Image (tube, rainbow, N blue to C red):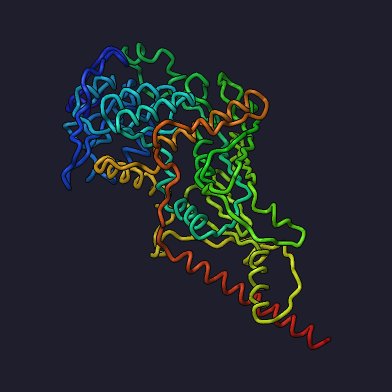
Amino acid sequence: MSSDVTRRNFIKTTGAAVGIITTAGFNAGSFAANEKIRLGIIGTGKQGQIAHIGQGLTVNKDQIKIVATCDIWSYNREIGANLIDDTDLSVYVDYKEMVDKEELDAVLIATPLYTHYQIVMDCLDAGLYVFCEKTMTMTIEESRNIVEKCNETGKFVQIGHQRHYNPYYNKAIWLANDKNMLGRITHITAQWHRNESWRRQLPKNHVPTAQDMKLIPDMNKHINWRLYNDMSAGLMTELGTHQLDVASWFLGSIPTKVSGFGDIEYWRDDRDAEDHTVLIYEWSVKPGDRGFRTIDRRSRDQKTTRINRPYKVRMTYSSICTNAKSHYGELIQGERGAFGLVGEQSLQFYAEPWYQEFLAAKAARAAGKQVAAKTSNSYIPGAAGNAGIPISVYTDENKSTKYDVWMANHNQWAGFANDVKTNGMPKANQITGLISAICGHKGNEAIRGGGTVEIDPELLAFNFETPDPHRFDEVEGPEPKETMERLRKEELDAARKLIEEAENAEAKA
């Protein structure tokens, strides 16, 4: 153990869960204007080190004080402690002892999935607010129990679905919902593709301590827990739930069924979690749902009595470990256009030409001209390259797009601190976590059962009021005004062309 750690208050225990939480954690219930929330970190592995300590928590250190960390592995414990510039930091092996001894307001849980449930429940029972990495739990029933525990204790669980705090996603949701920029959403495509085994090696020159070997009998499984179904739920819970969360966010509801395929097709080692998955999810969208959109007739053959009845939206999803083309992102497709969200760093709008031509023809007819119906297969603007229109989240165009991918980690912790201080409710709350858990686990059920699995909407039913899992922010920027002005110019240009064609036809007649 380094001298940095030994200068701190290191509490050595002989077991990972030997402590018993005998008293509720300290929570003042109110905060002075400049008072920091007191945070304990449970799990200082890569996710805790990089995404949280190194990014979100460092940026928000004026709002959050890390008073203690905990990890059962000496290697992670030492690195995590050394990342925190505070000689008063206490370092623990047993999270129960940390919760019992420290005066905490909240905890971060960044441990393997199979450990989430008990830690979350213990911390809620101790009167603490919880930030828990996704996916919330190993089973749907456990996630429902957490929702009930939140209601019982009056505390919340924020889930690490950071896209809820990403300005690109908030802007896309806002434009789709408040501005109806996509019209009716009809299809969603998402993927998370990589070309690697997802396996990690033991650190070079690290010699496990006697305590490590006692607490962690199988070190290989401990560091590669994502590859084993008794410790994780594979690609669907480690990656897929992020994007299923996005789809449910856009549509404002959970899917009603899922079909899927998957297996270990390439990385045939000792893992039992799939390395390839392909699924189709289906949503039933009905009037009154936030995602429901009425439409106008586009042809005389469409039945006006049928076009605005309930309809289905389907999402195709794939996660593979043998090719990184397209990496990860979502394509949200509507009748008027599509949003492309790539790598959490960009938002593109692809206008559908029929809608632009429809508006142009409407403008021409308003000018008293008869125009023939047209159909185009090219994108607007221009067929070459099917280029989209970039949507900015900044009024300052000089902002770096590389910074954006980290903004969500900064923002989610700023939001967490504010919600703890004000007893507010996170955007990515316990119901958000329940929805993504339902989607991920039902997807695995379909993959492993080889069929179509129905998803009961009653899984979201409780006998108490639950928080809104689908909130979004209005994100300022030069769009949609600039984008709509650009499209409007194209509409007017197309309208002028149609008017000229109509006038030429009249002259020839």
Tell me the residue at 78%/85% (across/down). 506
Position of 208 with respect to 340 (left or right) is left
The image quadrant of residue 367 is bottom right
**271 to 295, vertically: above or below:** above
Front-lying residue, 166 or 422: 422
Q: Is residue 216 above or below residue 459?
A: above
Looking at the rendered image, the quarter that the C terminus falls into is bottom right
- Counting the numbered discs, the total is 0
- The residue sitting at the front extreme is 305
Residue 384's x, y, as percent?
Answer: 67, 64
Residue 424 location in percent, x, y? 30, 42
Residue 321 image point, x, y percent: 58, 34
Q: Is residue 270 left or right of residue 48?
A: right
Q: Is residue 101 visible?
A: yes
| Residue found at the far bottom of this picture | 507
Q: Nearer the viewer, residue 272 or 5?
A: 272
Residue at the (58%, 54%) spot, across then down? 293
Depth check: give the residue in front, 423 or 219. 423
Residue found 57% across the figure and 69% down from its top = 487
Q: Quadrant of residue 129?
A: top left
Q: Is residue 55 visible?
A: no
Q: Residue furthest right?
A: 509
Q: Position of residue 57 (x, y in %)?
A: 29, 41
Left/right of residue 124 with respect to residue 267 in the rendered view? left
In the foreground, 133 or 61: 133
- What residue do we see at 59% from left, 29% from top? 275
Q: From the image, which quarter does the N terminus lie in?
A: top left
